[in-house]
Image (cartoon, rainbow, N blue to C red):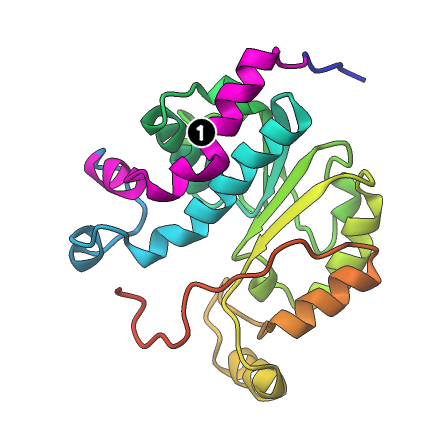
Amino acid sequence: MVQTSMMTNDETNKLTEAFSGKVWYHDINRVIVEQDRDFALTARQRSRRYPARLLRYFVPFHWLGREAAHRGRPLRVCEIGIAGGPMPRFTALGLRALGLEFSDVIERWIGVDIELLHEQLAELSYDELIEADVEKDADNIPADCDVYILLHVLEHLHSPEAVIGQLFPRLRPNAMVIAGFPTHPHLAVPFWNWYLRTHTKPNGHVSAMSNRRFTKAARTAGCTIEDVRAGYFMRASGRM
């Protein structure tokens, strides 16, 4: 097993200060939008000071910084469902905006997807890429990472509970899982499951997720829920 170098007290204090509150008030999103990077933002979203669409990356970014400061060392991260790689791109730009280096927070970043978009991923900060279907190849997912990120993955799975039940118990006891997905009222989940599976497009959503559905599956798999939050009370277009 590779041993990670621990941070000095000064390094830990610097990281703790950066993520103790400043990150929430620093205008990171505006800095990132001005970099002319593609985060699938519309012109209207780009005009917003805090585009709501970037919350899916901003919140995990915050937790990565806090977790590295808590552990006192850079993290080994496994991201499942990477698409074109916006999460490490956001992380690199966000850390730069806070005056930090990528290596201050991340030691190793592994990307997993059912189909790797190599041309889009070539210049990003992935140390390893694994092509795997998490519904069929969960045993191929590394089990020794500090943090696992699943952003907008579970709603694409036919059996999210089965994947959670197979994958999560394999992880280290102190591993952190950061999951994000569009939510529905729990009572509406059966209807939306049916609707999605009768109207889905290729690679589209096939499972309706709710907070209760996820937390039940995660707790059954032995997880403790530390934080739950939502980006919207009501959304019509996703163009806030």
Q: Indicate the position of residue 79 as horizontal and vertical percent values.
A: 59, 40
Q: Residue at x 49, y 36 (%)?
A: 20
What span is in magenta? 6-34
Query: Vertical placement of 113 versus 89: above or below?
Result: below
Q: Indicate the position of residue 121 as horizontal and vertical percent values.
A: 44, 32
User: Which residue corresponds to mark 1?
Assistant: 18
Query: In the visual, does 185 lie left or right of 73?
Result: left
Query: In the visual, does 65 lie left or right of 224?
Result: left
**Is any atom of residue 129 visible in this view?**
no
Q: Nearer the viewer, residue 179 or 49?
A: 49
Q: Nearer the viewer, residue 8 or 100?
A: 8
Query: In the visual, does 162 lie left or right of 183?
Result: right
Locate residue 174: give its quadrant. Answer: top right
Q: Residues within 10 Å of mark 1 (few under 14, many from 20)?
A: many
Q: Nearer the viewer, residue 240 or 132?
A: 240
Quick check: is 26 in the magenta stretch? yes
Quick check: is 76 in the magenta stretch? no
Query: Vertical placement of 90 versus 9: above or below?
Result: below
Three-letter amino acid code at the position of disc 1 = Ala
Locate residue 162: give its quadrant. Answer: bottom right
Q: Residue at x 36, y 27 (%)?
A: 98
Locate residue 207: give its quadrant. Answer: bottom right
Principal secondary structure, stretch drawn in magenta: helix
